[in-house]
Amino acid sequence: MESLHAPWRIQYILAPKSEPTETSLFTRIAQSSDDEANYVIARERTCYAILNTYPYVGGHLMVVPYKQTPDLHGLTDEELSDLMKLVRRCQDALTKVMKPNGFNIGINIGKAAGAGIQEHLHVHIVPRWAGDTNFMPVIAGTTVLPEALKDLATKLRAELVQ
């Protein structure tokens, strides 16, 4: 049997888990100036886009409002519009860079819905390819990513600047 390795996952598994704070991970990233280290690929006036550090598939990214709110009701109409416009721009960039066959785009609100960071709304954009779901995530609990996050972030930043 051949072994496949996902060495980036061990950082998450072994990392100390901090107690929940009033400031979310997304707020801390929003306030950071180190976009490369945080895989931030675009910043707009009211929101930003970031590659998921522990993605389901290659290219899985998220669009996050700067304002920390657990659901859509905490955003103004302008912030909500900006959020969806950046979602569309990111979908277009992923289409050009990765050429997926489709997308899953969604928001998980609340723990029961699968929200990993419940206190800060974010929109997932997951590119999909025909046949990309196979035995690996089901049996081995492992995903296979075809490209390093750093390389993909560079390509998406270049596309989003245009």
Image (tube, grey):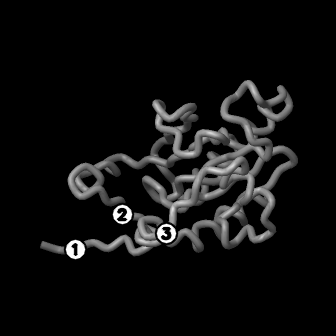
Q: Is the residue under label 2 in contact with that under label 3 (CB below 8 Å)?
A: no
Query: Which dot marks residue 15?
Result: 3
Q: x%, y% of residue 50?
A: 66, 56
Sequence-wise first label, 3 or 2: 3
Task: Give the residue displayed 66% in from the left and 38% down from the top.
Answer: 121
Q: x%, y% of residue 128?
A: 44, 47
Q: Quadrant of residue 84?
A: top right
Sequence-wise first label, 1 or 3: 1
Q: Quadrant of residue 109?
A: top right
Amino acid type at mark 2? Val
Task: Give the residue displayed 79% in from the left and 47% down from the top.
Answer: 66
Q: Is residue 108 above or below residue 55?
A: above
Q: Nearer the viewer, residue 11 or 1?
A: 11
Q: Secondary structure at mark 2?
A: loop
Q: Secondary structure at mark 1?
A: loop
Q: CA distance from mark 2 to mark 1?
A: 12 Å
In this picture, residue 12 sits left or right of residue 91: left
> Which residue is disc 1 drawn over?
3
Please identify the residue farthest to the front as the structure is shown.
19
Q: Is residue 159 above or below residue 87?
A: below
Query: Which dot marks residue 144?
Result: 2
Amino acid type at mark 3? Ala
Q: Residues within 10 Å of mark 3 (few under 14, many from 20)?
A: few
Q: CA distance from mark 3 to mark 2?
A: 21 Å
Q: Secondary structure at mark 3?
A: loop
